[in-house]
Image (spheres, helix red, strand yellow):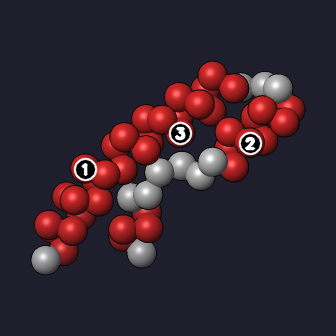
């Protein structure tokens, strides 16, 4: 559960934003940032749990 919490924001946010044509920039940036941060976060979580 801890590793699952460290995963990036789902792509559903971007899909919904593009469907309704609102908040595209925020959704895109959120998905990008959380994807980049997720890898180091999962490594740290794995190190703390071992």
Residue 13: x and y in percent read 68, 44
Proximity of marks 2 and 1: CB atoms separated by less than 8 Å? no
Residue lying at 24% horizontally and 64% vertically, measured from the top left = 45
Q: Residues within 10 Å of mark 2 (few under 14, many from 20)?
A: some
On the rendered structure, is 1 left or right of 42?
A: right
On the rendered structure, is 20 left or right of 7?
A: right
Judging by the rendered image, the residue that carries numbered circle 2 is 15
How many angstroms separate mark 2 from mark 1 (CA)? 25 Å
How many angstroms separate mark 2 from mark 3 (CA)? 11 Å
Question: Which of the 4 quarters of the picture holds residue 14?
Answer: top right
Q: Residue furthest right?
A: 20
Residue 38: x and y in percent read 36, 50
SS label for mark 3: helix
Q: Residues within 10 Å of mark 1 (few under 14, many from 20)?
A: few
Residue lying at 82% horizontally and 26% vertically, measured from the top left = 21
Q: Looking at the rendering, in which quadrant would you find the N terminus?
A: bottom left
Judging by the rendered image, the residue that carries numbered circle 3 is 31
Residue 25: x and y in percent read 63, 22
Residue lying at 78% horizontally and 32% vertically, measured from the top left = 18
Mark sitting on residue 40? 1
Q: Earlier in the sequence, mark 2 or mark 1?
A: 2
How many angstroms separate mark 3 from mark 1 (CA)? 15 Å
Residue lying at 25% horizontally and 50% vertically, measured from the top left = 40
Q: Earlier in the sequence, mark 3 or mark 1?
A: 3
Q: Looking at the rendering, in which quadrant would you find the C terminus?
A: bottom left
SS label for mark 2: helix
Proximity of marks 3 and 1: CB atoms separated by less than 8 Å? no
Relative to 3, say whether 16 is above or below: above
């Amino acid at each position: 559960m801890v590793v699952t919490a460290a995963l990036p924001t789902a792509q559903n946010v971007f899909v919904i934003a593009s469907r309704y044509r609102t908040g595209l920039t925020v959704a895109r940036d959120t998905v990008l940032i959380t994807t980049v941060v997720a890898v180091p976060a999962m490594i740290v979580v794995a190190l703390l749990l071992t």
